[in-house]
Every structure is written in C-alpha cells, then in structure tokens.
Amino acid sequence: MKVAIVQNRPEFGKVQDNLNRIEETLAGKSADLFVLPELFATGYRFKNMNEAHQFAEPVPGGKTSNFLLSLAKKKNAHFIAGLVEIEGDRIYNSSVILGAKGFIGRYRKIHLFDTEKSCFHTGRDAPPVFNLDGVKVGVMICFDWRFPETARSLALKGADIIAHPSNLVLPHCPQAMITRCLENRIFVITSDRVGVEERIPGEELTFIGQSQVVDPDGKILVRASETEEEVHIVDIDLKKARDKYLNAQNEIFKDRRPDLYIHND
C-alpha cells in the first residue's frame, strides 16, 4: 500500500490560494492514501471562536470537503485532512475522510491544545476507525498524541494505520510517535505543516514540520524537513501491523492486564 505525507505552509485565511497550492503540489503524485495537515487550508491561529466561525464549513458539502473529494476522484485515492467544521452553533477542529466514492466520515478533535479551547468545541465522540477498502485506518489530530490512550484505543479497535493530521509546535511528537507505534504495533502517518504565524503581537508560533511515517517496529520510513513544503510517498506492508506477536510467547494485546490497571469511573 502506498501512503503519502503532505507537508505544507498555508497562508492564514487565504483558503483558495492554499487549496490551489495543494492541487499543484500533488499534480502527478499517486498513492492509495494521502494525509494532509490539521487545518491545512485555513491556517491555525484563530484569535477567537468568532473568527474560526468565519472559516467554518459543513461536513460534508463544504468548500474544503468538496475540493478533497474532487482530488480523491481524480486520483482514485483516499484523503484525510483537517478543517474547521460547523454543525449548528458548534465549531470543531475536525478531520474529514473521503474516497473516490464520496464522503466516508469525520473525526472531531477531543484534546484541544492551548488557545484552541477558546476557538473550538471539544469533540464528543471517541476517535474512529474506518474501513478503507479493507484497510483499517484510525484518525487522531495533533495534540491527541500526548494522550497514549488515544492511539491505544484505535489499535484495540483494529486500526492498521493511524492517520495523524497535525500543526505541531511542541518538539516532542515526532519521537513520541515511535513509542506509540511500538506500543501498539501499528503504522502512524503524521502530516504536519511548516512556517510561522504571529497573528497576536508577541505570540509567535513556529511549526516544526517533520512529517513522517513510522512502522510497527518504530522505524522511521520517511521524515520530512523542519522548514520545507514536501510530499513523500512510501510503500508499507500491512502484514506488519496485523502481527501483534513480539515472539512466540508474547502477543501485545493478549498479554494486557486491564483487570489490574487503574480505572477512572
């Protein structure tokens, strides 16, 4: 299976320009699954929920979803990417999942980072796993990585791959995802952005890039730079994620002891 990480540098608020740039960047590129960053078409740093509302769109049927659907049909591929979603009076930091046959699903971020808490509502549903033509793909967004239960729950639901659209500013995630892959024997595709935003004077955000694909043995199959827009396509062997044995005696999920772990009821 061919998977693609897409690392971009969006200009805040210039949605159409950012979409055009993605289309140009992906021209001639082929993969089974493309993962794009969190909020890839809008930029990240909203000043408040009112501003986020200006860029919010319904899912499906909004501008960004329709753009991704068009790409999915042209490339006969699946796309997972982040956007600002509106449903009723609620605004979410969401990821959409689409394929050549249409809209498949969404995930609304459940762990909001820093000022996101004043811009978005928290997702109410557990991170989902989707069956994409026989491949089970779980979805989490950016800061979800900091909570190991997120990746573990997706793995326990049968995910072969976790797609991880991100806008990373903390330095730890790329290395931490190696541990998440080892813990769960899964592939993780983290697609991050690069560039700087200073939308509030004196509060500069520098995005760390380093989009990557990590395999179930913790091997980094590809890692992008910290500063450049890049697309990387790699072949992955799904059989590695479906074999949970470390040796003849240890299967990582069968050896769990949830009866002895702490529970917060």
Image (cartoon, rainbow, N blue to C red):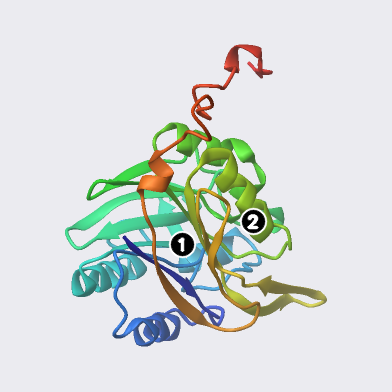
Q: Are marks 2 and 1 in contact (CB under 8 Å)?
A: no
Neighbours of disc 1 within 10 Å: few (<14), some (14-19), many (20+): many
Residue kind at label 1, given as amino acid type: Gly
Q: Residue at x 36, y 50 (%)?
A: 238
The residue tagged with tag 1: helix, strand or loop?
Answer: strand
Q: Which quarter of the image is occupied by the N terminus?
A: bottom left
Residue 166, compared with residue 185, is above or below; it is below
Total residue callouts: 2
Q: Which residue is mark 2?
A: 116
Is 246 rendered above or below residue 36?
above
Along the viewing direction, whichever of 138 and 95 lies nearer the viewer: 138
- Foreground of the two, 138 or 233: 233
Q: Position of residue 193 (x, y in %)?
A: 57, 73
Of the numbered discs 2 and 1, the one sitting upstream in the chain is 1
Q: Residue at x 57, y 67 (%)?
A: 51
| Label number found at residue 82 | 1
**Residue 210 placed where, x, y %?**
61, 70
Query: In the rendered structure, which amino acid carries the disc numbered 2?
Result: Glu
